[in-house]
Amino acid sequence: MTQTALIVAHGAPADPAPAQVALEALATTVAGLLPGWRIAGATLAAPDALEEALAACPGALIYPFFMAEGWFTRTALPRRLTAAGATGLHQLPAFGTDPRLTDLVARAALQGAEAAGLTPKTTTLLLAAHGGKASPASAQATQALAARLAQRGDFAAIRVGFLEQEPFLADAARGLGAALCLPLFALRAGHLARDVPQALRDAGFTCPLLPAIGEHPDTPALIARALGAVQLPGRKALQSAGSVSILEAPSRSRQ
């Protein structure tokens, strides 16, 4: 029996096509790590994308490709699923809540520092996130991640900057010296294409800006591990994670 899953992201309402294409490509990569699975991708912003994917993948596991649990995962997405007649589906925790995300972010940052010729122990890691005045979920998740990264001790300091709440990214990015910025976004959409670079320019930040964490090459494996571990009636958890074993915690000897 083919197991099915649907990766759902917010997308970009102003220009939905590129994010939808990127999410479909991600779904294809994840499917390659899970033999026997059918994986689809849909953004909430792309017209009819969610409804068409649900029709093609009845009974699918729902994987929210969001950086935090909040209004979109708890209200908007369930509402859209119900409106499409897709009830009783199992929705996994959001991408940003995966316990393995800390290691993934650390690995991405260390790789970025190495590529830029920076020494992590003398470099500040700046985390750029969305934030929001209406809900504390994004900020809380980001600050918790920053605390875990600081505990690891890979970088000289960890700073956080938000687009829609204090501390604003343009303020957090000022006067850092040796630094690099890692955007905590799932997809490269409007915020990452325009708002993050603009905030960094406003701050005079000329250090490296890394790709969004959702674009990291190890992200498909993290998603595959989460999907493969689900145990529901009629489903078996993935017995062998050999194809996605790269998500084990990395050695800190790479500092």
Image (cartoon, rainbow, N blue to C red):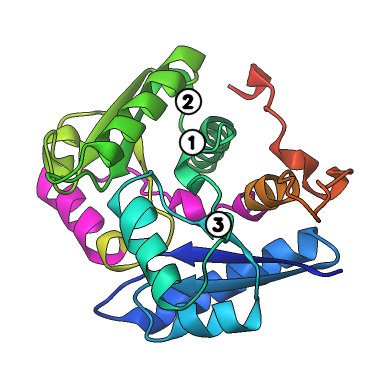
Of 70 and 234, which appears nearest the observer? 234
Provide the residue designation for mark 3. 63
Residue at position x 59%, y 55% from top?
A: 90
Nearer mark to the viewer, of 3 and 1: 3
Task: Count residues near mark 2 (Cα–Cα under 10 Å), then give few for <14, some for 14-19, many for 20+.
Answer: some
Residue 11 lies in the magenta-colored region: no
Is 30 left or right of 135, judged from the image as shown?
A: right
Callout 3–callout 2 Cβ contact below 8 Å: no
Residue 5 higher or lower than 123, as above or below: below
Question: Sequence-wise, which precedes: disc 3 or disc 1?
Answer: 3
Query: Distance between the Cα atoms at labels 1 and 2?
Result: 7 Å
Of 94 and 112, which appears nearest the observer? 94
Task: Count residues near mark 1 (Cα–Cα under 10 Å), then give few for <14, some for 14-19, many for 20+.
Answer: many
Question: Sequence-wise, which precedes: disc 1 or disc 2?
Answer: 1
**Residue 17 placement (x, y as % from top left):** 40, 83
Residue 206 lies in the magenta-colored region: yes
- Mark 2 secondary-structure assignment: loop
Residue at position x 50%, y 20% from top?
A: 154
